[in-house]
Image (cartoon, rainbow, N blue to C red):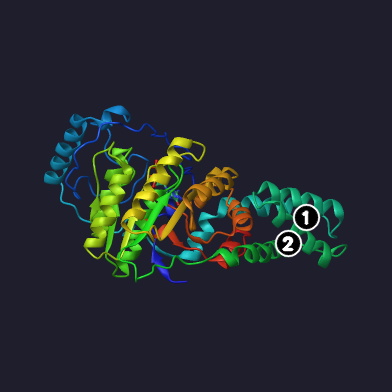
């Protein structure tokens, strides 16, 4: 595990990210002229801290006004003012922070989940010998930690088989927990393989509101840029002006052009333009953002299907990866999200974010067992280094509280 610059350390505790930012679900009717891409439209905020990272005091409230030409003009003027007064200096989000290995950041990030589990395990294992009542209690603890019934049963069965009526400590149980969790996660821990024969390799980012799509795109763009890939971003969350600006900030940091239109523009039209342009420019990777949508909103899921159909008009093999971002703090609801987004949008892989903000990290195990979809990345903070490829063993050890 290599050391990386980290800026998240001081933010890990006491920050409970908002799991349900306001939906922006009204589809405006009036098509607007494309805005010129203005990569310097926003100040060089190191990383988005809230759902609406741009200064808000000048902005009208979100909603229908975002779609008016006046509003768009105002944004452009404000962007120009900011650009004049403030040079954009792309900087790593976490430049001044101490270096810390990914494993220790993972452990710190998952501390709420692991503390929850290990303290419950310790309180169950007060007796010296393992009996049936203790096993039942343990099963309840594991189910409450969102690990899922099957994994909970697998763990208690292993203990029943190997340790029944024998002396056992909390740390023995934690080690069985780590082993069983790793068994479930091993097969799904698969890196996101970018097929370099595809120019561009199109990644579509989907998920419910506030699950971390835009932030994840920024972090991925940073990783791809560091690998020397030529990237393009598409601000397909056309519902929210702030999301467009947020992506433009990431575009500046990573040197990636951002295809954008004013808030309210048609998302599928934007996706079409983006794939066409990325193809014409021979880009390696195109990452397309989408508006957050609740999986139970039929019309919004229809719209997502349309975006995919339109992408296929330019390249029938695209999107080459459809990544569902899951906010770990949503717990059991994440299972429903995987099921419905999977059916409607053909999810090819998962990214789980905000594992640092919850005691419910065990949900990833339940999801892995139920769907077997590849888990490509996990996020344990808002900083650019807080997203890493998913490693089953590290996660299993961290959640079981094993150092
Ligand atoms: N603590 C923590 N916060 C995160 C993580 N990933 C994203 N966030 C934060 O979650 C919030 C929402 O992230 P966005 O990327 O805007 O989410 P989105 O899915 O694009 O949101 P919509 O555009 O509303 O659908 C932001 O404040 C992010 O900084 C993470 O791993 N940990």
Q: Is residue 254 left or right of residue 128?
A: left
Q: Nearer the viewer, residue 240 or 403?
A: 240
Which residue corresponds to mark 2? Answer: 173
Q: Nearer the viewer, residue 51 or 270?
A: 270
Whole-percent x, y for residue 65 in the image: 27, 28
Kindly check if marks 1 and 2 are in contact, taking CB atoms under 8 A apart as contact.
Answer: yes
Q: Nearer the viewer, residue 124 or 239?
A: 239
Real-space Cα distance between discs 1 and 2?
Answer: 9 Å
Task: Name the quadrant containing residue 265.
Answer: top left
Whole-percent x, y for residue 137 in the image: 78, 49
Residue at the outermost right position: 165
Which SS class for mark 1? loop
Crowding around mark 2 (Cα neighbors within 10 Å: few <14, some 14 to 19, many 20+) is many
Which residue corresponds to mark 1? Answer: 125
In this view, 78 is above or below 179: above
Ranked by sequence position, the earlier of labels 1 and 2 is 1
In this view, 109 is above or below 403: above
> Is ligand 1 less than 8 Å from the beta carbon at label 2?
no
């Amino acid at each position: 595990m290599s050391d990386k610059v980290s800026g998240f350390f001081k933010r890990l505790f006491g920050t409970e990210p908002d799991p349900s930012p306001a939906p922006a679900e009204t589809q405006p009717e009036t098509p607007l002229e494309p805005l010129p891409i203005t990569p310097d439209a926003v100040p060089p905020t190191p990383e988005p801290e809230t759902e609406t990272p741009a200064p808000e005091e000048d902005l009208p409230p979100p909603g229908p006004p975002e779609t008016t030409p006046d509003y768009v003009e105002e944004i452009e003027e404000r962007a120009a003012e900011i650009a004049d007064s403030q040079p954009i200096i792309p900087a790593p989000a976490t430049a001044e922070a101490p270096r810390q290995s990914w494993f220790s950041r993972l452990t710190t990030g998952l501390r709420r989940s692991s503390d929850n589990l290990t303290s419950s395990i310790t309180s169950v294992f007060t007796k010296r010998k393992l009996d049936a009542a203790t096993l039942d209690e343990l099963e309840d603890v594991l189910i409450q930690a969102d690990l899922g019934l099957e994994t909970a049963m697998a763990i208690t069965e292993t203990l029943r088989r190997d340790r029944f009526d024998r002396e056992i400590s909390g740390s023995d149980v934690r080690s069985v927990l780590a082993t069983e969790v790793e068994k479930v996660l091993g097969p799904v821990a698969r890196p996101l393989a970018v097929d370099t024969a595809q120019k561009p390799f199109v990644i579509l980012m989907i998920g419910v509101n506030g699950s971390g799509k835009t932030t994840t795109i920024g972090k991925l763009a940073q990783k791809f840029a560091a690998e020397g890939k030529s990237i393009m971003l598409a601000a397909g969350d056309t519902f929210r002006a702030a999301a467009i600006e947020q992506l433009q900030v990431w575009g500046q940091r990573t040197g990636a052009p951002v295809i954008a239109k004013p808030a309210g523009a048609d998302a599928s039209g934007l996706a079409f333009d983006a794939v066409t342009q990325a193809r014409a420019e021979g880009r390696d990777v195109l990452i397309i953002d989408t508006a957050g949508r609740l999986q139970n909103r039929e019309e919004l899921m229809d719209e997502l299907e349309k975006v995919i159909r339109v992408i296929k008009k330019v390249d029938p093999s695209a999107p080459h990866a459809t990544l569902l971002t899951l906010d770990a703090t949503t717990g059991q609801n994440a299972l429903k999200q995987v099921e419905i987004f999977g059916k409607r949008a053909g999810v090819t892989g998962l990214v789980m974010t905000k594992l640092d903000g919850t005691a419910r990290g065990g949900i990833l195990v339940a999801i892995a067992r139920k769907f077997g979809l590849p888990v490509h990345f996990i996020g344990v903070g808002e900083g650019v280094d807080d997203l890493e490829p998913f490693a089953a063993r590290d996660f299993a050890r961290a959640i079981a509280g094993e150092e």
